[in-house]
Image: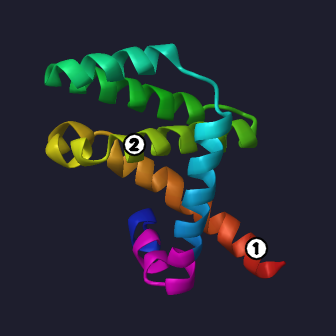
Amino acid sequence: MRQNDKIEKWLEDNSFTDYMQKRTIEIFNYILNNYPYDPKYEELDEYFDRDDRYVAPLVDYLVYRLHLAKLKRNSKKRREGIWWVFVQVILLGEYVECFAEEFNRLLPELRISIIPMLHTEYVRTKNN
């Protein structure tokens, strides 16, 4: 079964989606309060606030951070890095929809990274 088919099947499970929402809120708060400040991202975000042309470098940086996180050997750091990118996308909010063409490079890959990670956690908590 292809990865996207598995994801669609998992998303049909209401208890999994409830877990996903709860866990996302927990991680969102954790990342905002505990993750180190990233001056490069903040600089790009500030430029983007002033000029929409900076959306491409901002998305490029997020893609870079996602790839960097996926390459980490330490699973905790890998998960935190992926979550960090996800939280930044959440914080960008409506810009993700306004600049959908630019974010299309990031969102499918982020989805394929986040949802299986969440499902693994969900199965682990269900089995305990």
Q: Earlier in the sequence, mark 2 or mark 1?
A: 2
36 or 126: nearer the viewer:
36
Q: Main secondary structure of the magenta part?
A: helix
Q: Percent from the top left, x then y, of residue 47?
A: 27, 16
Q: Quadrant of residue 96?
A: top left
Circle 1 residue:
125
Q: Which mark is residue 20?
A: none
Circle 2 residue:
91
* The residue stretch that appears in magenta: 7-18
Q: Percent from the top left, x then y, of residue 90?
A: 40, 47
Q: Percent from the top left, x then y, of residue 20?
A: 55, 68
13 or 54: nearer the viewer:
54
Name the element at disc 2.
Answer: helix
Does any portion of residue 69 appear in the rendered image? yes
With respect to residue 113, does 101 lie above or below? above
- Residue drawn at x 64%, y 25% is 36
4 or 26: nearer the viewer:
26
Counting the numbered discs, the total is 2
Residue 108 sits inside the magenta stretch: no
Please state which amino acid type lies under the numbered disc 1: Thr
Q: Nearer the observer, disc 2 or disc 1? A: 2
Please state which amino acid type lies under the numbered disc 2: Leu
- Residue drawn at x 23%, y 27% is 55
With respect to residue 91, does 17 lie above or below? below
Name the element at disc 1.
Answer: helix
Residues packed near mark 2 inside 10 Å, few (<14), some (14 to 19) or many (20 plus): few
Q: Percent from the top left, x then y, of residue 18?
A: 54, 77
- Residue drawn at x 49%, y 35% is 66
Residue 15 sits inside the magenta stretch: yes
